[in-house]
Image (tube, rainbow, N blue to C red):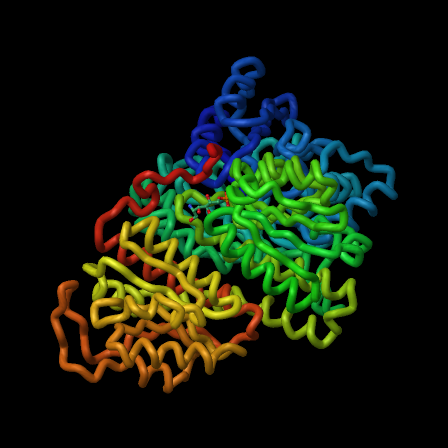
Amino acid sequence: MCGIVGYVGQKDCAPILVEGLRRLEYRGYDSAGLAVHTGRGVEIVRAVGKLSNLDAALKKNPLSGTTGIGHTRWATHGRPSEANAHPHVAGHVAVVHNGIIENHVQLRRDLESRGVKLQSDTDTEIVAHLIDEAMRQGRTRLSEAVRTALGHVRGAYAIAVVSGDAPDEIVVAKQDSPLVLGIGENENFAASDIPAILAHTRDIILLHDGEMAVLTASHVEISTLEGTRITREHKRIDWSPMQAEKGGYKHFMLKEIHEQPRAIEDTLRGRVDLPNADVVGAEIGLSAELAQRVSRVYFVACGTSAHSAMAGRYWVEQLARIPSTLEIGSEVRTRDPVFVPNDLVVAVSQSGETLDTLAAVKAAKAAGAHVLAVTNVVDSAIARASDGALYTHAGPEIGVASTKCFTSQLAALLMLAIYMGRRRGTLDTDGAHRVLDALWRVPAQMREVLARGEDIKAIAKKYLRTRDMLFLGRGTEFPVALEGALKLKEISYIHAEGYAAGEMKHGPIALIDEDMPVVVVCPRDNQYDKTFSNMEEVKAREGQLIAVCTEGDEDVRALCFSDAAPRSSTRGILSAAEPDVITIPEAANEVQPLLTVLPLQLLAYYMADLKGTDVDQPRNLAKTVTVE
Ligand code: AGP
């Protein structure tokens, strides 16, 4: 999730661009750069690391001009380096880009076959060369060259383009990545997000997918990529800068919960080959040969990542029929574990920096195991220490409590299991197509579940004063139950415990009484009947049932009805009327965890917010635990 800024007007643009990029730092940065039309053509300055490094580079090489573009990079293709930093230049053209070009491999081959020498590992540089080629093939207007170039491109992009041949204009285009235009007095702006331009104008235009615009100091001309002119109403933004960074949400965590459909779309992008019912190997970080040879998959992770890894373990066993195990990172180091060369160790880590997981990776490497990192940060320590990496494309996660990275990890691990099952012949075409088709539909179904936030908030209000909460699930809903309990613990400070539903009768059932809320994750899956029985056991002991189930499941709703009169208890008034049920759409067993976790994330969020805790930075917690 990179940050783009563009300016064309009467003022010296470099300071405006840098300040705009600073407002987008929450979108992640591992490098940054500017391209400014200085009168001597377009000149660029780039720097690796924080924006302050770009500031320093600009002091050494100032760029003066009134037309320019800027970029902060969150690497998806190619490690963080100056060569991979944006803007990327080809001929007289400079481009900044946010998104993922799906057909970048083929486009790169085509360019190289035409003698083009690419200087970076990025997908963005390819777009710059395509635009430059179009200019040299006689497209007289920069916008026409951009239109021609994008005709070859598949994937997600928000781009801004400047050219030495068009000193007073910026061309922008949008497909599946955000891009807003800011309308000023004799100046106009483009940016990935509103915070970058709020200091200059509150008058914005939101570009839609498949649209582009030509910005000059006095004019903004919008059209479709096919060339049809468009008029678009301006919007007035009355957010504060901080509200703008949160996209109008109260907390980053809530914004990130609602970003999950996009995060899954970006994580799946370019990797799902539905026509062939397969996963694209180039993006998985594991060779076909090794996928066939592996004799054990050993997942290692911490916290929320351990929960996604647990689901991954179930899927690898179910779909690839490989013996799999899950170890908590900190425990691996206390056990003197036995790794063997045919082990595939899968290290799951949002940050890619968790010391407990990194130490386990190093132990596995030392023992000759092959290590695959599943992480959200390109070139992170765990990615660098591993033999290969499968990147989630969730974008930076600011809230300490992980949400969008959890579901992105689930999507990545399910793709890994499918990839391995297809190579080992344990997953046939129909089976793979069924799961991939279900996975492809998850983002839209997530949006349906997230639209039920107010119902979930109403349930949260009922249990605000509870001191304990039990979360139960079976199969891949067991890690979902663990994750729901962790979310509640870490942001509301209410004690919560996740348990395998089948394990309740071995002890935890003693906890059940009218004061114990029990959240049961009970979608229509292959464990439904047993989990439903667990719900009946809770009900028989007056436990307060909260259920996550499949739409239309009247049996669960009936069971959750509390027929007692409204009661007060030591922990607040419990309504007797409305059953506490949150539903998810019908979905294949394998993808249900990506949906059932959403109500638990929102339940934890609303209980914490209503309690008034610091949701984004809960007490005692750090976003990345780089200590033992
Ligand atoms: C997530 O909500 C927690 N903040 C924490 O458990 C986290 O998942 C854990 O520290 C592992 O982090 P990682 O994914 O970056 O390795």
Vertical comparison of 110 with 46: above or below: below
**In the displayed structure, would residue 274 be above or below residue 560?**
above
Is residue 212 visible to us here?
A: yes
Query: Left of 312 or right of it: where is 533?
Result: left
Can residue 216 be seen by looking at this rendering? no
Q: Return the residue nearer the eye: 124 or 6.
A: 124
Of residues 260 and 44, which is closer to you in this image?
260
For image coordinates 36% across by 40% down, the residue present is: 621
What residue lies at 72% left-to-right and 76% top-to-bottom? 430
470 horizontally vs 57: left or right: left
Side of 107 relative to 580 (left or right): right
Residue 46 image point, x, y percent: 60, 26
Question: Residue 121's image quarter?
Answer: top right
Q: Residue at x 45, y 52 (%)?
A: 206
Q: Position of residue 105 (x, y in %)?
A: 76, 48
Q: Position of residue 449 (x, y in %)?
A: 42, 68
- Number of numbered callouts drawn: 0
Q: Which of these two is toward me, 237 or 303?
A: 303
- Residue occupying the point 81% across, 43% down: 111
Report x, y in % for residue 588: 56, 75
Side of 247 where 114 appears, left or right: right
Q: Residue furthest top?
A: 60
In this view, 534 is above or below 168: below
Residue 465: image quadrant is: bottom left
Residue 532 or residue 548, whichever sits in front: 532
